[in-house]
Amino acid sequence: MATMIPDTAKQRVVFPSSAEEIFYRAASTGLGAGWRVYYSCVLSAFEPGEGIQSNEIDFVLWHPSAGFVVIEVKGGRIQIENGEFFSINRQGEKFRIQNPFNQALVWKNRFYRFLKRENMRMPVCHAVCLPNLDESELPVTAGVERELVIGRGRLANLEQTLNEIVRKSHLEKYLKFVNPREKAIDRLVNGSHYESRKYLREYIDHHDLRVADIESIQESLVTPVTSALRLGIEGEAGTGKTMLAAMLARRYRDEGARVLLTSSNPLLNERLRADTGRGVDVMTYSELASRFGVELLRVPSGYQGKLEDWIQFDGPEKLKQAIGQLDAADPRRYDVILCDEAQDVQPFWWEAIESLLADSQTGRFYLFFDRSQGVFGSGGGETLFVPEQVLPVAPPYFPLVHNYRTTKEISTFAREFRTGKQVLQSHSARSGFMPQVVTYKDREDAQKKLEALLLDLVRREHVRPGEIALVSARNPRSPESILAGMKSSSLGIDDGVAAPGGVQVATVAGFKGLEAKAAILVNFSEHKMEISNPIMSSMMYVAATRARHLLIVMLREGDSKIDAVSTALKAAAIPGSVGSLVIDRSEEVFEAEGVVTFFDPDRMGSLTIDDGERGRRSFLFFPYDLVRAGLGNIRVGMRLLFRPRQIGEVVVASDFRLPRAS
C-alpha cells in the first residue's frame, strides 16, 4: 500500500470537501508500495517581481520510477463558460472557481524551480481530479487537456492512470533519475517549506454555523426551568449554563420583571450585558456588594479581624444588614436573581444575595454551577466544592448533559482533571482535533515556539488573532511567566499582555465562563503546585474547556505535569479521534472503527464501538451497504471503518471500508 502523509489510521485528517477525501481514499487503497502521498501541501517561494508567494495544492505524489505528480482536486459538478470554471453544489448553487488546470500548472512550475534550487533533478507533472465527473463529460477546449483529467472512470484504476499521465508528460530519458532517500523526499515535501493544513478556518466556520441550532435547543429548556421558583442548574463547562442564564434573563425582563444576573468574572459580564441588553442588571458579586457600601474582598479600615473572617462572616453580614433596610419597592430589589458561576461564591454570601428578592415567597432564584470549578471560590482553599452542602438551593438539580462548546476530544481530555464527588458527566457529539502538547526548555525557547504556533494558526490556518486565547496559570506579567517581555506586534501581544484586536491573554480565573476558538495553555509549569492538588487540577480543567475547537498545552521539559497530561491524552484517543472528517457535509461525518458483533447476511448486522464518554455504542448496518462497498465474507469479530448516519430517528452505519494496516 501507499504511504499516506498524514495517515488517517494514526490521526484526525480534516477534508474541506468530500472530493478530496474521495481521492485520498482512492490513493490509499489503489496505489501500491513505493508511492508516497502528501495531502495539502503549501509552497512558499520568492517570485521575481512578486515577492514571497504562498500556494497550496491538494496532493503531491511521489514514486521512485515516476517522480512527482501534482494534483488539484475539484468537487461537485463542473461548468465551463467562456473559459471560466464554475462548481455546482448539491443544492444547485453555482460558484466561480479558479481554473484547476492553471492552479496545478502554476504550483508545478514553482515546485520545479524549488527542486532546481535544492539540486534535485526529478521530473514533475500535473493532473486534475474531478471525482464527481466522467472524463467524457468535459468539453474539448484549448484550456482543458482530457489526458490530464482523473474522473470517476480513471480514478477506479488510479495507479494505471498515474503511470499513463507520467509517461505522456515526460520523455523516457527524463524518467531515468537518481532516487533520493525517502527521508529526503519527506524533507522536501513535508518539511520546512511544506505543511499539511488542519483546515481549521473551514472547520471553525462550519461548526460555528450550528450556534443557532444550539440556541434553539437551550431555548427549549427555558419552560421546564421556569416551572420552579428556586432551582440549581448543574453542568460541566460547555453545556450552555451561561447561555441559558441569559435566555432566562431576557425572558423575565420581557415579562416586566426586575432581573439581576451575576457572575464572578468582569470579562464575562461585559459579554452578558451585550447579550441581554437593557433592562437586566449584570454585575459581579463584589460589584453588587459595593452598591451598598460593602467591599466583600477587601478589609475596611479599622477592622481588627483577619481577611478570611471579613470575607466569610463579617462582610456578608454587613451586606445583609444594608439590604434589609431597603423597602420592598426599592429598585435595588429584584423579582428574579440569576447567579452564574455559583461555585465561586462564598457560602455565607448567599443569605445576603437572596435577601435582595422583593418577595421571598414569589421571587425567583436560580443558581448555575459546575462542581468541578469550586476550588476558585466557595470550595474554600484546597477543599472540594459540594453543592449539596453549601448552596442555598436543595437538590435535585436540573442537569445539563450536552456539551455544545468543546469537541469530544477536548472534553474527554479535560474530564481527566475534574474534581468533586458525584460529578455530572456530559457528552459531546462533535469530533475534532486531538489536543496537542508542546514542550520547551526555557523561556526563550517557549517564546520562540509560541510565536511559531501563533503564526501557524494565523497565517496558514487563517484563524484571526482575536479568536486565539493564551490562558495562563499565573499572572502573565509576573517575572516567572514565559510571556514576560514577549512582543509580537503583528499578533497583538506587547510585553506578554493582550493589545487591542490581538490575541487574548488572560489568567485561568479571568477567562472563566469565556471561550476561544483556539486556546493555548501557558505557565502551568511555572506554577509550582502539583497537578494532584485540587486547585491545580481544577485550573487545568477550566483552562482546557475554554477551547472550542483547538487546544494546545505548553509545558516545560521534565515537568511532572507532563505525565498527567499524557494520561489525559490517552483517554482522549477514543474511536473517532482518528480517521477522516469531512467539513462540507452537514451530518455527523466522523469516521469510526467498530467491531462486528452480529451479522445476518439476509437481514442486518450490528457494529459496536467503545465511545469513551458515552460508553459502548452499537450501530445497525445492512448487507446492501456492504455490497456497495465491495465487501464480502463479513464475520463476527471483524473490524470495519464506517460513518454513522442519521436515518429518521435511527443512526445506522454506512460508507464501509476495511482498516488500513498500521
Image: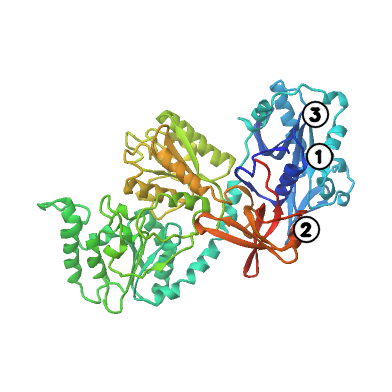
Quickly name the residue at label 3: 65
Quickly name the residue at label 1: 159
Disc 1 vs disc 2: Cβ atoms closer than 8 Å?
Answer: no
> Of label 1 and label 2, which has the lower sequence position?
1
Up/down of 154 relative to 55, above or below: below
Amino acid type of the residue tagged 1 in the rendering:
Glu
Mark 2 residue crowding within 10 angstroms, few (<14) / some (14–19) / many (20+):
few
The residue under the point 67% across, 25% down is: 184
Amino acid type of the residue tagged 3 in the rendering:
Ser
Q: Judging from the image, what secondary structure is the residue with disc 1 in? A: helix
Amino acid type of the residue tagged 2 in the rendering:
Val
Left or right for 527, reference 67: left
Mark 1 residue crowding within 10 angstroms, few (<14) / some (14–19) / many (20+):
some
Question: Foreground residue, 8 or 614?
Answer: 614
- Disc 3 or disc 2, which is closer to the eye? 2
> Of label 3 and label 2, which has the lower sequence position?
3
The residue under the point 57% across, 39% down is: 459
Left or right for 57, reference 145: left
Quickly name the residue at label 2: 627
Rendered image quadrant of residue 444: top left
Q: Position of residue 74 (x, y in %)?
A: 75, 48
Q: How many marks?
A: 3
- Determine the CA span between mark 1 and mark 3: 12 Å
